[in-house]
Amino acid sequence: MERYCEQEKNCLRVYVPRELDHHEADRLKQEADFFIETGQVKTLVFDFAGTEFMDSSGIGVIIGRSRKMGYFGGEVYAEHLSGRILKIFKVSGLHTLIRTSVPKQQKEREGENHNA
């Protein structure tokens, strides 16, 4: 089974799979919750570097982990969002809940200012 999470000190990095659908969302949720519920995670970073697709169950997992981190007083970030995933973030409203980090080249290409 593929591992999604890597913890370094108080930062948990979640490597989002290529396709975050119902099947992958449940496994990612369980693994992330295991780390978050220890109370030692203060920063959660979703890394979308290899992600090409995300459905509503993936959006739900991200929202749920964001809320859970809020209960523990932590912060949530998303990085390496492709154009497609960034569009999903905007349409779903995730960009208002989670700070995003977009590569400088992509910002220049799209001519937009994103949360950093």
Image: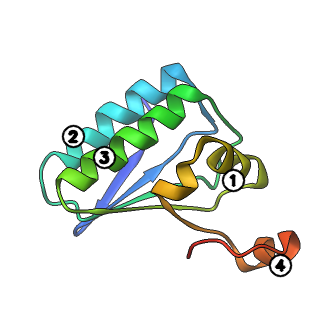
Q: Quick one: label 1 or label 3, which is nearer the N terminus?
A: 3
Q: Which residue is at 36% across, 49% downward?
A: 66
Cβ–Cβ below 8 Å for labels 3 and 4?
no
Q: Quick one: label 3 or label 4, which is nearer the N terminus?
A: 3
**x and y percent of residue 48 in the render?**
59, 52
Q: Residue furthest right?
A: 109
Classify mark 4: residues with Cα within 10 Å, few (<14), some (14-19) or many (20+): few
Pick whichever, 89 or 96, lies toward us: 96
Classify mark 1: residues with Cα within 10 Å, few (<14), some (14-19) or many (20+): some
Q: Quick one: label 1 or label 4, which is nearer the N terminus?
A: 1
Q: Nearer the viewer, mark 4 or mark 2?
A: 4
Q: Mark on residue 34?
A: 2
Residue 3 seen in this snapshot: no
Q: Which residue is at 46% across, 55% downward?
A: 97
Colour scheme used in the picture?
Answer: rainbow
**x and y percent of residue 40 in the render?**
14, 60
Q: Which residue is at 66% across, 50% downward?
A: 90
Q: Amino acid at mark 3?
A: Arg
Secondary structure under tag 1 reads: helix
Classify mark 2: residues with Cα within 10 Å, few (<14), some (14-19) or many (20+): few
Secondary structure under tag 4 reads: helix
Q: Mark on residue 108?
A: 4
Q: Quick one: label 2 or label 3, which is nearer the N terminus?
A: 2
Cβ–Cβ below 8 Å for labels 1 and 3?
no
Secondary structure under tag 2 reads: helix
**x and y percent of residue 67 in the render?**
31, 46
